[in-house]
Image (cartoon, grey):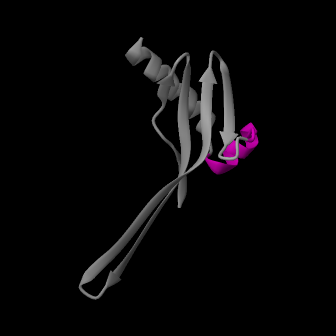
Amino acid sequence: MNVVLEAPRRAGRSVVAALVRRELWAARCGPAVAVQAGKEPVAMLILTGDRVTALDIGNRALTEDTLDSLCPGVLARFRAAAADLEAREG
């Protein structure tokens, strides 16, 4: 299981991206292989101007430390991805 940042999307004047937990399970069952995968949201990151807001799925604010414990370096990656999106879309 790991937590990753999804690709950002524009929403009006803001850029949003989901932070999701992904799971992948696989097992060999005789000659066959059983696989199960899942993805669930953990938080939403919203960039408006220079301000990033992070909310969990219960709509509670998350601190930078909490985000970093879930996915180290996620804020820097989100800002870079948002800047790249802005450069591509103008």
Check if residue 81 falls in the magenta segment: no
Q: Is residue 31 visible?
A: yes
| Residue depicted at 54% across the width and 40% down the height | 18
| Residue depicted at 44% across the width and 22% down the height | 85
Q: Which one is in front, 58 or 6?
A: 58
Query: Residue lying furthest bottom in this view?
Result: 30
Q: Which residues are magenta?
A: 60-71
Residue 47 on image: x %, y %: 61, 24
Residue 75 left/right relative to 26: right
Residue 54 left/right relative to 36: right
Residue 29 left/right relative to 56: left
Residue 87 on image: x %, y %: 43, 15
Residue 51 on image: x %, y %: 68, 21
Q: Which one is in front, 68 or 90?
A: 90
Q: Quadrant of the C terminus?
A: top left
Work out whether 39 lies above or below 44: below
| Residue depicted at 46% across the width and 17% down the height | 86
Work out whether 86 lies above or below 61: above
| Residue depicted at 48% across the width and 31% down the height | 8
Check if residue 67 falls in the magenta segment: yes
Q: Is residue 73 visible?
A: no
Q: How many marks?
A: 0
